[in-house]
Amino acid sequence: MGILIKNIDALPSADGPAALGVDIGIDGDRVAFVQKSGSPLPPGFAAGRTIPGAGRLAIPGLVNAHCHAAMTLLRGYADDMELETWLFDRIFPAEAQLSGDDIYWGTMLGAAEMIKNGVTCFNDMYLKMDSVAEAILGSGIRAAVSVGPLLTGKRGDAGVDADSCKAFFRKWDGAGGGNIRTNMEIHSIYLFQPETLAAGARLAKELGSAIHIHILETAAERENMLREYGKSSVLLAEEYGLLDSPVIAAHCVHVDSAEILRLRDRGASVAHNPSSNLKLASGIAPVPEMLRAGVNVCLGTDGAASNNSLDMFMEMRLAALLHKGASREPAAVPAAQAFRMATRNGALALGFEDCGEIAPGRKADITIVQLDRPHLSPLHSHLSTLVYSARGSDAETVIVNGKVLMENRELLTIDEEKTTHMARAAAKKFIASQ
Ligand SMILES: [Zn+2]
Protein backbone atom coordinates (compact mmCIF):
# COMPACT_ATOMS: atom_id res chain seq x y z
CA MET A 1 0.00 0.00 0.00
CA GLY A 2 1.31 3.41 -0.95
CA ILE A 3 1.30 6.86 0.57
CA LEU A 4 -0.74 9.63 -1.04
CA ILE A 5 0.14 13.27 -0.28
CA LYS A 6 -3.00 15.08 -1.34
CA ASN A 7 -3.46 18.52 -2.86
CA ILE A 8 -0.09 19.98 -1.98
CA ASP A 9 2.10 22.65 -3.58
CA ALA A 10 5.56 21.36 -4.42
CA LEU A 11 9.00 22.53 -5.43
CA PRO A 12 10.03 19.25 -7.04
CA SER A 13 13.54 20.53 -7.80
CA ALA A 14 15.51 23.74 -7.92
CA ASP A 15 15.38 23.75 -11.70
CA GLY A 16 11.69 24.19 -12.38
CA PRO A 17 8.66 26.14 -11.23
CA ALA A 18 6.48 25.27 -8.26
CA ALA A 19 3.83 22.66 -8.97
CA LEU A 20 0.56 23.88 -7.48
CA GLY A 21 -2.16 21.61 -6.11
CA VAL A 22 -0.68 18.22 -6.92
CA ASP A 23 -1.04 14.72 -5.53
CA ILE A 24 2.20 12.89 -4.86
CA GLY A 25 2.06 9.10 -4.80
CA ILE A 26 4.70 7.02 -3.06
CA ASP A 27 4.97 3.32 -3.78
CA GLY A 28 7.46 1.44 -1.64
CA ASP A 29 10.66 3.48 -1.42
CA ARG A 30 10.03 5.59 -4.54
CA VAL A 31 7.89 8.39 -5.87
CA ALA A 32 5.30 6.80 -8.17
CA PHE A 33 3.68 9.93 -9.58
CA VAL A 34 3.21 13.68 -9.27
CA GLN A 35 -0.08 14.73 -10.87
CA LYS A 36 -2.79 17.36 -10.73
CA SER A 37 -4.76 16.86 -7.56
CA GLY A 38 -7.97 14.90 -8.00
CA SER A 39 -6.82 13.09 -11.18
CA PRO A 40 -7.62 9.38 -11.20
CA LEU A 41 -4.96 7.33 -9.40
CA PRO A 42 -2.74 5.30 -11.73
CA PRO A 43 -3.86 1.69 -12.12
CA GLY A 44 -2.46 -0.56 -9.42
CA PHE A 45 -1.80 2.26 -6.96
CA ALA A 46 -3.65 2.00 -3.66
CA ALA A 47 -3.18 4.54 -0.91
CA GLY A 48 -2.82 2.90 2.49
CA ARG A 49 -2.13 6.26 4.05
CA THR A 50 -3.18 9.75 3.01
CA ILE A 51 -1.32 12.87 4.14
CA PRO A 52 -3.24 16.15 3.72
CA GLY A 53 -1.26 18.71 1.72
CA ALA A 54 -3.37 21.88 1.66
CA GLY A 55 -1.47 24.89 3.01
CA ARG A 56 1.80 22.98 2.79
CA LEU A 57 4.83 22.70 0.54
CA ALA A 58 6.57 19.47 -0.46
CA ILE A 59 10.29 19.73 -1.17
CA PRO A 60 13.01 17.14 -1.71
CA GLY A 61 14.43 16.36 1.73
CA LEU A 62 17.47 18.48 2.54
CA VAL A 63 20.90 16.88 2.25
CA ASN A 64 23.50 17.84 4.85
CA ALA A 65 26.70 17.18 2.91
CA HIS A 66 29.19 17.58 5.75
CA CYS A 67 28.49 16.67 9.35
CA HIS A 68 29.86 15.03 12.46
CA ALA A 69 26.49 14.18 13.99
CA ALA A 70 27.76 13.01 17.39
CA MET A 71 29.42 16.40 17.92
CA THR A 72 26.01 17.41 19.21
CA LEU A 73 27.54 16.20 22.51
CA LEU A 74 30.01 19.11 22.27
CA ARG A 75 27.46 21.76 21.34
CA GLY A 76 28.41 24.94 23.17
CA TYR A 77 31.46 23.28 24.74
CA ALA A 78 34.10 25.45 23.08
CA ASP A 79 33.13 28.72 21.40
CA ASP A 80 34.73 31.93 20.22
CA MET A 81 38.15 30.58 19.27
CA GLU A 82 39.88 29.89 15.96
CA LEU A 83 40.14 26.41 14.53
CA GLU A 84 43.61 25.34 15.67
CA THR A 85 42.98 26.14 19.36
CA TRP A 86 39.41 24.90 19.18
CA LEU A 87 40.35 21.57 17.55
CA PHE A 88 43.64 20.65 19.18
CA ASP A 89 43.19 22.11 22.67
CA ARG A 90 39.49 21.52 23.22
CA ILE A 91 37.79 19.16 20.78
CA PHE A 92 40.35 16.36 20.25
CA PRO A 93 40.97 15.90 24.04
CA ALA A 94 37.22 15.86 24.71
CA GLU A 95 36.58 13.36 21.90
CA ALA A 96 39.22 11.03 23.33
CA GLN A 97 36.85 10.50 26.28
CA LEU A 98 33.90 9.38 24.15
CA SER A 99 32.74 5.76 24.36
CA GLY A 100 30.88 3.92 21.59
CA ASP A 101 27.66 4.36 23.59
CA ASP A 102 28.25 8.11 23.88
CA ILE A 103 28.73 8.33 20.14
CA TYR A 104 25.63 6.26 19.49
CA TRP A 105 23.47 8.67 21.53
CA GLY A 106 25.21 11.72 20.12
CA THR A 107 24.51 10.50 16.60
CA MET A 108 20.91 9.67 17.51
CA LEU A 109 20.50 13.19 18.89
CA GLY A 110 21.97 14.58 15.66
CA ALA A 111 19.62 12.43 13.58
CA ALA A 112 16.65 13.60 15.69
CA GLU A 113 17.67 17.23 15.25
CA MET A 114 18.18 16.84 11.51
CA ILE A 115 14.86 15.07 10.90
CA LYS A 116 13.10 17.79 12.93
CA ASN A 117 14.78 20.30 10.59
CA GLY A 118 13.69 18.60 7.36
CA VAL A 119 16.96 16.82 6.62
CA THR A 120 16.55 13.39 5.04
CA CYS A 121 20.18 12.58 4.27
CA PHE A 122 23.58 13.46 5.67
CA ASN A 123 27.27 12.81 5.20
CA ASP A 124 29.01 11.83 8.41
CA MET A 125 32.60 11.54 9.52
CA TYR A 126 33.49 10.66 13.09
CA LEU A 127 35.00 8.13 15.49
CA LYS A 128 33.72 4.63 16.32
CA MET A 129 31.71 4.54 13.12
CA ASP A 130 29.97 1.25 13.96
CA SER A 131 28.15 3.13 16.72
CA VAL A 132 27.34 5.94 14.26
CA ALA A 133 25.97 3.47 11.71
CA GLU A 134 23.88 1.67 14.37
CA ALA A 135 22.20 4.96 15.30
CA ILE A 136 21.59 5.86 11.66
CA LEU A 137 20.07 2.46 11.04
CA GLY A 138 17.75 2.86 14.02
CA SER A 139 16.69 6.37 13.05
CA GLY A 140 15.75 5.48 9.46
CA ILE A 141 17.53 8.54 8.06
CA ARG A 142 19.69 8.18 4.93
CA ALA A 143 23.42 8.73 5.33
CA ALA A 144 26.85 8.27 3.86
CA VAL A 145 29.17 7.18 6.65
CA SER A 146 32.91 7.68 6.31
CA VAL A 147 35.29 5.42 8.16
CA GLY A 148 38.89 6.52 8.64
CA PRO A 149 41.53 3.83 8.06
CA LEU A 150 44.53 6.14 8.49
CA LEU A 151 46.07 5.68 11.91
CA THR A 152 47.51 8.09 14.39
CA GLY A 153 47.67 11.39 12.56
CA LYS A 154 49.10 14.74 13.51
CA ARG A 155 52.15 13.51 11.58
CA GLY A 156 53.03 10.82 14.07
CA ASP A 157 54.06 7.67 12.27
CA ALA A 158 50.80 6.36 10.93
CA GLY A 159 49.80 3.45 8.75
CA VAL A 160 46.60 2.23 7.18
CA ASP A 161 44.19 -0.22 8.77
CA ALA A 162 42.79 -1.69 5.57
CA ASP A 163 41.24 -4.75 7.23
CA SER A 164 38.87 -2.94 9.58
CA CYS A 165 37.95 -0.52 6.80
CA LYS A 166 37.04 -3.42 4.52
CA ALA A 167 35.08 -5.10 7.32
CA PHE A 168 33.15 -1.87 7.93
CA PHE A 169 32.32 -1.57 4.23
CA ARG A 170 31.15 -5.19 4.09
CA LYS A 171 28.95 -4.74 7.13
CA TRP A 172 27.38 -1.40 6.34
CA ASP A 173 27.42 -0.57 2.62
CA GLY A 174 23.81 -0.83 1.42
CA ALA A 175 22.41 -1.48 4.93
CA GLY A 176 19.00 -0.18 5.95
CA GLY A 177 17.42 -0.90 2.55
CA GLY A 178 20.16 1.04 0.80
CA ASN A 179 19.87 4.03 3.17
CA ILE A 180 23.50 3.66 4.27
CA ARG A 181 26.49 4.06 1.97
CA THR A 182 30.08 3.74 3.10
CA ASN A 183 32.88 6.11 2.21
CA MET A 184 36.44 6.53 3.31
CA GLU A 185 37.44 9.34 5.64
CA ILE A 186 40.75 11.02 5.12
CA HIS A 187 40.37 13.67 7.79
CA SER A 188 42.69 16.17 6.13
CA ILE A 189 46.02 16.48 4.36
CA TYR A 190 47.61 18.32 7.28
CA LEU A 191 47.13 15.49 9.79
CA PHE A 192 49.07 12.81 7.91
CA GLN A 193 52.36 12.04 6.22
CA PRO A 194 52.50 11.84 2.41
CA GLU A 195 53.09 8.07 2.27
CA THR A 196 50.09 7.43 4.55
CA LEU A 197 47.87 9.62 2.38
CA ALA A 198 49.08 7.83 -0.76
CA ALA A 199 48.32 4.45 0.86
CA GLY A 200 44.86 5.73 1.77
CA ALA A 201 44.30 6.82 -1.83
CA ARG A 202 45.28 3.34 -3.07
CA LEU A 203 42.86 1.71 -0.63
CA ALA A 204 40.02 4.00 -1.75
CA LYS A 205 40.66 3.02 -5.37
CA GLU A 206 40.77 -0.66 -4.46
CA LEU A 207 37.42 -0.37 -2.66
CA GLY A 208 35.85 1.93 -5.25
CA SER A 209 35.12 4.32 -2.40
CA ALA A 210 34.52 8.03 -2.36
CA ILE A 211 36.75 10.09 -0.06
CA HIS A 212 35.34 12.51 2.49
CA ILE A 213 38.00 15.04 3.46
CA HIS A 214 38.52 18.53 4.92
CA ILE A 215 40.50 20.73 2.52
CA LEU A 216 41.86 24.24 3.13
CA GLU A 217 39.46 25.20 5.89
CA THR A 218 41.89 27.80 7.23
CA ALA A 219 44.51 30.20 5.93
CA ALA A 220 46.94 28.58 8.38
CA GLU A 221 46.56 25.24 6.58
CA ARG A 222 47.40 26.87 3.27
CA GLU A 223 50.43 28.69 4.69
CA ASN A 224 51.73 25.59 6.48
CA MET A 225 51.38 23.34 3.44
CA LEU A 226 53.03 25.90 1.16
CA ARG A 227 55.90 26.35 3.61
CA GLU A 228 56.44 22.63 4.13
CA TYR A 229 55.68 21.18 0.68
CA GLY A 230 55.62 24.16 -1.65
CA LYS A 231 52.05 23.26 -2.63
CA SER A 232 48.60 23.68 -1.12
CA SER A 233 46.40 20.81 0.02
CA VAL A 234 44.45 20.58 -3.27
CA LEU A 235 47.60 19.93 -5.31
CA LEU A 236 48.99 17.62 -2.64
CA ALA A 237 45.72 15.66 -2.63
CA GLU A 238 46.09 15.25 -6.38
CA GLU A 239 49.76 14.28 -6.13
CA TYR A 240 49.00 11.55 -3.56
CA GLY A 241 46.19 10.13 -5.76
CA LEU A 242 43.31 11.21 -3.58
CA LEU A 243 41.53 13.02 -6.42
CA ASP A 244 41.50 9.79 -8.47
CA SER A 245 38.45 8.76 -6.41
CA PRO A 246 35.21 10.75 -6.09
CA VAL A 247 35.94 13.38 -3.46
CA ILE A 248 33.67 15.34 -1.13
CA ALA A 249 35.90 18.17 0.02
CA ALA A 250 34.56 20.06 3.01
CA HIS A 251 35.20 23.79 3.29
CA CYS A 252 37.71 24.77 0.53
CA VAL A 253 37.70 28.28 1.99
CA HIS A 254 41.28 29.08 0.96
CA VAL A 255 41.45 27.70 -2.59
CA ASP A 256 42.79 29.82 -5.44
CA SER A 257 41.34 30.02 -8.96
CA ALA A 258 43.65 27.37 -10.41
CA GLU A 259 42.76 24.97 -7.60
CA ILE A 260 39.05 25.53 -8.19
CA LEU A 261 39.53 24.48 -11.81
CA ARG A 262 41.55 21.48 -10.68
CA LEU A 263 38.77 20.38 -8.33
CA ARG A 264 36.24 20.80 -11.13
CA ASP A 265 38.34 18.91 -13.67
CA ARG A 266 38.79 16.01 -11.25
CA GLY A 267 35.03 15.88 -10.53
CA ALA A 268 35.37 16.72 -6.84
CA SER A 269 32.36 18.08 -4.95
CA VAL A 270 32.80 20.87 -2.44
CA ALA A 271 30.73 20.92 0.76
CA HIS A 272 30.25 24.54 1.77
CA ASN A 273 29.70 25.14 5.52
CA PRO A 274 28.98 28.84 5.91
CA SER A 275 28.00 28.89 9.61
CA SER A 276 30.99 26.85 10.71
CA ASN A 277 33.41 28.90 8.62
CA LEU A 278 32.06 32.11 10.13
CA LYS A 279 31.99 30.82 13.70
CA LEU A 280 35.58 29.56 13.59
CA ALA A 281 36.61 32.78 11.85
CA SER A 282 38.00 30.70 8.97
CA GLY A 283 36.76 33.04 6.25
CA ILE A 284 34.32 32.93 3.35
CA ALA A 285 34.71 30.25 0.68
CA PRO A 286 34.77 31.53 -2.93
CA VAL A 287 31.47 29.79 -3.68
CA PRO A 288 30.29 32.06 -6.53
CA GLU A 289 33.59 31.45 -8.34
CA MET A 290 33.26 27.70 -7.77
CA LEU A 291 29.72 27.75 -9.12
CA ARG A 292 30.76 29.76 -12.18
CA ALA A 293 33.54 27.25 -12.81
CA GLY A 294 31.03 24.39 -12.68
CA VAL A 295 32.11 22.75 -9.42
CA ASN A 296 29.37 20.68 -7.78
CA VAL A 297 28.93 22.74 -4.60
CA CYS A 298 26.74 21.30 -1.88
CA LEU A 299 25.91 22.49 1.60
CA GLY A 300 26.62 21.26 5.12
CA THR A 301 26.30 22.24 8.74
CA ASP A 302 29.60 20.71 9.90
CA GLY A 303 29.41 19.45 13.49
CA ALA A 304 27.25 21.05 16.17
CA ALA A 305 30.41 22.09 18.04
CA SER A 306 31.24 24.61 15.32
CA ASN A 307 27.80 25.75 14.15
CA ASN A 308 26.07 25.17 16.78
CA SER A 309 23.02 23.80 15.02
CA LEU A 310 22.16 21.17 12.41
CA ASP A 311 19.42 23.30 10.82
CA MET A 312 19.94 23.13 7.06
CA PHE A 313 17.26 25.78 6.46
CA MET A 314 19.52 28.22 8.29
CA GLU A 315 22.50 27.07 6.20
CA MET A 316 20.56 27.45 2.96
CA ARG A 317 19.51 30.99 3.88
CA LEU A 318 23.00 31.92 5.01
CA ALA A 319 24.59 30.54 1.83
CA ALA A 320 22.20 32.66 -0.22
CA LEU A 321 22.86 35.82 1.85
CA LEU A 322 26.54 35.60 2.72
CA HIS A 323 27.91 35.71 -0.80
CA LYS A 324 25.68 38.61 -1.80
CA GLY A 325 27.13 40.69 1.02
CA ALA A 326 30.69 39.53 0.47
CA SER A 327 30.64 40.25 -3.28
CA ARG A 328 28.08 43.08 -3.28
CA GLU A 329 26.40 41.12 -6.03
CA PRO A 330 22.74 40.37 -5.25
CA ALA A 331 22.60 37.37 -7.58
CA ALA A 332 25.89 35.83 -6.35
CA VAL A 333 24.00 32.82 -4.93
CA PRO A 334 20.33 33.09 -5.95
CA ALA A 335 17.63 31.31 -3.96
CA ALA A 336 17.32 28.52 -6.52
CA GLN A 337 21.06 27.89 -6.36
CA ALA A 338 21.03 27.66 -2.55
CA PHE A 339 18.08 25.25 -2.77
CA ARG A 340 19.93 23.15 -5.38
CA MET A 341 23.06 23.08 -3.20
CA ALA A 342 20.96 21.87 -0.25
CA THR A 343 19.22 19.12 -2.23
CA ARG A 344 20.26 17.69 -5.60
CA ASN A 345 23.92 18.76 -5.48
CA GLY A 346 24.31 17.12 -2.08
CA ALA A 347 22.63 13.91 -3.22
CA LEU A 348 24.94 13.72 -6.24
CA ALA A 349 28.03 14.39 -4.12
CA LEU A 350 27.12 11.57 -1.75
CA GLY A 351 26.42 9.09 -4.54
CA PHE A 352 22.67 8.96 -3.87
CA GLU A 353 21.84 9.64 -7.50
CA ASP A 354 18.17 8.76 -7.06
CA CYS A 355 17.67 11.42 -4.39
CA GLY A 356 17.38 15.20 -4.22
CA GLU A 357 14.33 15.68 -6.47
CA ILE A 358 10.65 14.78 -6.31
CA ALA A 359 9.97 12.95 -9.54
CA PRO A 360 8.59 9.56 -10.58
CA GLY A 361 11.25 6.92 -10.05
CA ARG A 362 13.26 8.96 -7.58
CA LYS A 363 13.63 7.83 -3.98
CA ALA A 364 10.80 9.09 -1.78
CA ASP A 365 12.80 11.44 0.45
CA ILE A 366 10.35 14.30 1.01
CA THR A 367 10.00 17.09 3.55
CA ILE A 368 6.61 18.74 3.99
CA VAL A 369 6.75 22.34 5.17
CA GLN A 370 3.77 23.94 6.91
CA LEU A 371 3.15 27.24 5.06
CA ASP A 372 0.17 28.47 7.00
CA ARG A 373 2.17 30.59 9.44
CA PRO A 374 2.59 34.32 10.02
CA HIS A 375 6.30 34.43 9.12
CA LEU A 376 5.59 32.60 5.83
CA SER A 377 2.68 34.82 4.76
CA PRO A 378 1.75 36.06 2.25
CA LEU A 379 3.07 33.71 -0.38
CA HIS A 380 4.42 35.58 -3.40
CA SER A 381 7.00 32.96 -4.30
CA HIS A 382 7.31 29.44 -2.94
CA LEU A 383 11.06 29.50 -3.58
CA SER A 384 11.68 32.83 -1.82
CA THR A 385 9.54 31.78 1.10
CA LEU A 386 11.40 28.49 1.40
CA VAL A 387 14.93 29.92 1.22
CA TYR A 388 14.60 33.33 2.85
CA SER A 389 11.75 32.94 5.36
CA ALA A 390 11.31 29.31 6.39
CA ARG A 391 13.01 27.71 9.38
CA GLY A 392 13.83 24.15 10.22
CA SER A 393 10.97 24.08 12.70
CA ASP A 394 8.53 24.64 9.82
CA ALA A 395 9.23 21.08 8.67
CA GLU A 396 6.08 19.21 9.65
CA THR A 397 6.41 15.76 8.10
CA VAL A 398 9.53 13.99 6.86
CA ILE A 399 9.64 10.89 4.68
CA VAL A 400 12.82 8.92 3.93
CA ASN A 401 12.95 5.97 1.55
CA GLY A 402 9.15 5.90 1.54
CA LYS A 403 8.94 5.68 5.33
CA VAL A 404 7.43 8.44 7.48
CA LEU A 405 10.05 9.39 10.09
CA MET A 406 8.24 12.46 11.44
CA GLU A 407 4.55 13.30 11.29
CA ASN A 408 3.13 16.58 12.61
CA ARG A 409 6.52 17.28 14.29
CA GLU A 410 6.44 13.96 16.15
CA LEU A 411 9.39 11.62 15.58
CA LEU A 412 8.17 8.11 14.80
CA THR A 413 11.45 6.18 14.77
CA ILE A 414 13.39 7.96 17.53
CA ASP A 415 12.44 8.19 21.19
CA GLU A 416 13.08 11.91 21.48
CA GLU A 417 12.85 12.12 25.26
CA LYS A 418 15.16 9.16 25.88
CA THR A 419 17.65 10.32 23.23
CA THR A 420 17.87 13.80 24.71
CA HIS A 421 18.27 12.36 28.20
CA MET A 422 21.02 9.89 27.17
CA ALA A 423 22.93 12.51 25.17
CA ARG A 424 22.80 14.95 28.09
CA ALA A 425 24.12 12.24 30.38
CA ALA A 426 26.97 11.47 27.94
CA ALA A 427 27.83 15.18 27.72
CA LYS A 428 28.08 15.53 31.50
CA LYS A 429 31.64 14.21 31.44
CA PHE A 430 32.77 17.31 29.52
CA ILE A 431 31.11 19.61 31.97
CA ALA A 432 32.93 17.72 34.76
CA SER A 433 36.28 18.06 32.97
CA GLN A 434 35.95 21.77 32.25
ZN1 LIG B 1 34.13 18.94 9.53
Image (cartoon, grey):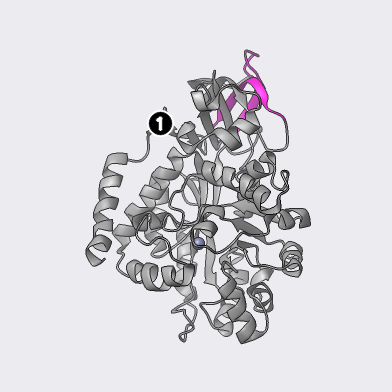
- Residue occupied by mark 1: 409
Percent position (x, y) of residue 410? Answer: 37, 32
Q: Quadrant of the C terminus?
A: bottom left
Tell me the chief SS of the magenta region: strand
Percent position (x, y) of residue 404? Answer: 45, 33
Which quadrant of the view contains residue 38? Answer: top right
Residue 32 highlighted magenta (yes or no): yes
Instruction: Tell me, yes or no, if residue 30 can be seen here.
Output: no
Which quadrant of the view contains residue 286? Answer: bottom right
Question: What residue do we see at 27% from left, 57% from top?
Answer: 426
User: Residue lying furthest left in this view?
Assistant: 432
Q: Is mark 1 within 8 Å of ligand 1?
A: no
Please determine whether, in this image, residue 343 is positioned above or below residue 217: above
**Amino acid at the residue labelled 1:** Arg
Residue 108 in the figure: left or right of residue 149: left
Instruction: Tell me, yes or no, if residue 238 can be seen here.
Output: yes
Question: What residue do we see at 69% from left, 44% from top?
Answer: 337
Near-viewer residue (171 or 61): 61
Question: What residue do we see at 57% from left, 74% from top?
Answer: 221
Q: How many marks?
A: 1
Near-viewer residue (385 or 200): 385
Region rendered in magenta? 17-41
Residue 368 highlighted magenta (yes or no): no
